[in-house]
Image (cartoon, helix red, strand yellow):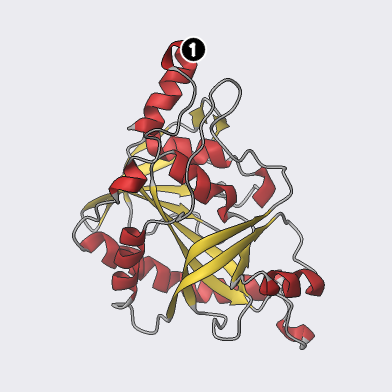
């Protein structure tokens, strides 16, 4: 089942016929909100607003582990993250969409980055952190939305926030080879892999960050929200086309990411550890 994580400005999924709410409480704390389960265009879908109802949580305050766990427990096999971002390259103009394939973690250690630790050791490969199958399905759906310009194969750099970056930081990320900058997709993307969930980011470029010379083009919240709002309808249309298409099958490498990755023997785990690990292994 596909799960949608709504980013800035996307706090509900219009047209979703809600059938149930899954609890926010998890072994890793509370998710940003209860997970909505329902149907959109007749297809089952899950929805979770990343920042909570009404946008209460800053990027570093989001409980990413609880969010991903709650979605997996509710039956998700795929996650599409809808996120606002800044563009670090001329070609990705504000108002364009992007599907990054790689991520750079430029956060500052304030976030819980893994389900593992505290007596359960595991090392999961994130060399290819997104699901190419899900990305291909999203790109196919995007091609059916008039006016939607989509870029693929880019690199997303995640910064700590909540402030917008300095020009020096913007130039540094460009030197790293990043094409996008945002505040939320790390550790979300890596936790999704630990949970054996196919993951893709649908990034909406709202600004040129601050690497260009004109101060009027530097990231400002009011301009970001205005541009994002203008693009949300296209994002919703894309999701509709995605759900109307044949169901995507995640790659075996994604759905089996924990095979051989867990180092701690089963008999050393307590009941609570076995229970949450069983959810991740589904």
Q: Is residue 2 above or below residue 282?
A: below
Nearer-the-camera pick, 132 or 39: 132
Q: Label 1 belongs to which residue? A: 268
Above or below, 108 against 267 in this view is below
- Viewer-nearest residue: 53 or 271: 271
Helix, strand or loop for disc 1: helix
Q: Position of residue 200 (x, y in %)?
A: 42, 58
Number of marks in picture:
1
In the displayed structure, 179 sits above or below 41; it is below
User: Is residue 55 left or right of 98 when viewed as pictured?
Assistant: right
Q: Is residue 77 visible?
A: no
- Residue 167: image location, x then y, percent: 79, 74
Which quadrant holds residue 210? bottom right
Q: Residue at x 44, y 36 (%)?
A: 70
Query: Which residue shows up at 48% across the image and 19% down it?
Result: 273
Q: Is residue 280 left or right of residue 223?
A: left
In percent of the image, x 59 and y 73: which residue is there? 179
**Residue 41 makes an appearance in the image:** yes
Image coords of residue 134 (percent x, y):
33, 59
């Amino acid at each position: 089942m596909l799960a949608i994580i709504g980013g800035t400005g996307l706090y509900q999924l219009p047209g979703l016929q809600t059938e149930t709410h899954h609890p926010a409480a998890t072994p890793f704390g509370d998710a940003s909100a209860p997970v909505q389960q329902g149907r959109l265009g007749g297809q089952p879908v899950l929805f979770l607003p990343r920042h909570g109802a009404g946008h209460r949580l800053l990027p570093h305050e989001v409980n990413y582990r609880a969010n991903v766990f709650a979605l997996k427990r509710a039956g998700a096999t795929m996650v599409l993250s809808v996120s606002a971002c800044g563009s670090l390259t001329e070609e990705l103009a504000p108002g364009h969409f992007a599907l990054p394939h790689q991520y750079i973690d430029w956060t500052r250690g304030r976030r819980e980055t893994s389900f593992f630790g505290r007596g359960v050791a595991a090392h999961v490969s994130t060399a290819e952190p997104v699901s190419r199958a899900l990305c291909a399905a999203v790109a196919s759906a995007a091609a059916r939305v008039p006016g939607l310009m989509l870029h693929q194969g880019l690199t997303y750099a995640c910064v700590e926030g909540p402030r917008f970056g300095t020009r020096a930081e913007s130039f540094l990320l460009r030197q790293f080879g990043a094409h996008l900058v945002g505040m939320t997709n790390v550790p979300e993307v890596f936790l999704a892999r630990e949970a054996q969930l196919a993951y893709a980011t649908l990034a909406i470029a709202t600004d040129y960050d601050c690497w260009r010379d004109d101060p009027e083009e530097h990231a400002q919240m009011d301009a970001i929200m205005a541009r994002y709002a203008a693009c949300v309808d296209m994002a919703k249309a894309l999701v509709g086309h995605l759900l109307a298409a044949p169901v995507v099958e995640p790659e075996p490498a994604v759905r089996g990411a924990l095979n051989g990755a867990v180092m701690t023997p089963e008999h050393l785990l307590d009941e609570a550890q076995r229970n949450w690990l069983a959810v991740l292994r589904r």
